Image (cartoon, rainbow, N blue to C red):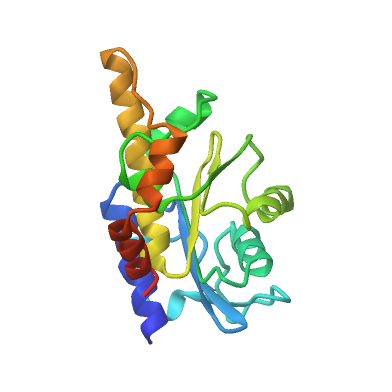
Amino acid sequence: MQIIEELKKYAHKLVVGGLVVGAGGNLSLRDGDYMYISPSGYDLQEIDDHQWVKVHIESGKVEGDLRPSSEVLMHLACFRENPHINAVLHAHPTYSVAISSAGKEIPPMFPDFPAMVNSVGYLDYIIPTTELLADAVGEIITEHEVIVMRNHGVLTVGKTLKEAYFYMQLTEESAKVLAISTLFGGPRILTKEECKELRNLSAERYRSRLLQE
């Protein structure tokens, strides 16, 4: 099943990319009126094909005996609020968590980030796995591809898992560059005008389309 193969591929990428550790992180993919999501308590690299949990998006009804990720409500909120979202990733990337927990935002530090990511939203700490967090995410998910949750992690969405994963990589890389640049006198942040120019480049628009295929 192609959906399961895609989920397995990006679950592996999250782990080997150092974006999650242990049983942390979760991901899901839309399949019509349903989504498939990682099961609760599993290392993302150790999920067998039959262990991905099928959940009805509108009702939240779970099929099978396994429990879906404890962040299932957050994933459902994304799919319910924006029909253009087909993929959701949630991870705990080190630099993004560190920068955001210090009360700072992750600025555009190099061309790829502002060229590919239109908007990053921020949420102050809300206890994970709760309806409170899911509701907060649902309120802003139509406006952002990336949501940084302070003292928690990062959520990215896309039309494909490839797109959502790329947003996660870019967010963490920008946070890393910011952290390192502070050791050398502080960063030069790209201006709004420079970011706008990057988004208008034909090469960047072409790359963006490829991520959605």
Location of residue 3 (image quadrant): bottom left
Residue 185: give x, y in percent of width and height.
Answer: 30, 12
Location of residue 60 (image quadrant): bottom right
What's the residue at 51%, 54% (across, down)? 145
| Location of the C terminus (image quadrant) | bottom left
Residue 100: give x, y in percent of width and height.
Answer: 50, 31
User: Which residue is farthest bottom?
Assistant: 1
Q: Is residue 93 visible?
A: no
Left or right, 65 with respect to 176, comes to right
Left or right, 120 with respect to 113, comes to right
Return the residue nearer the eye: 152 or 32.
32
- Name above or below for residue 77 compared with residue 84: above
Residue 41: give x, y in percent of width and height.
Answer: 48, 58
Residue 49: give x, y in percent of width and height.
Answer: 38, 79
| Location of the N terminus (image quadrant) | bottom left
- Name above or below for residue 206 compared with residue 153: below
User: Which residue is farthest top?
Assistant: 185
Q: Is residue 60 visible?
A: yes
Return the residue nearer the eye: 120 or 27.
120
What's the residue at 57%, 84% (across, down)? 32
Return the residue nearer the eye: 43 or 91.
91
What's the residue at 68%, 48% (across, down)? 133
- Name above or below for residue 91 compared with residue 64: above
Left or right, 127 with respect to 32, comes to right
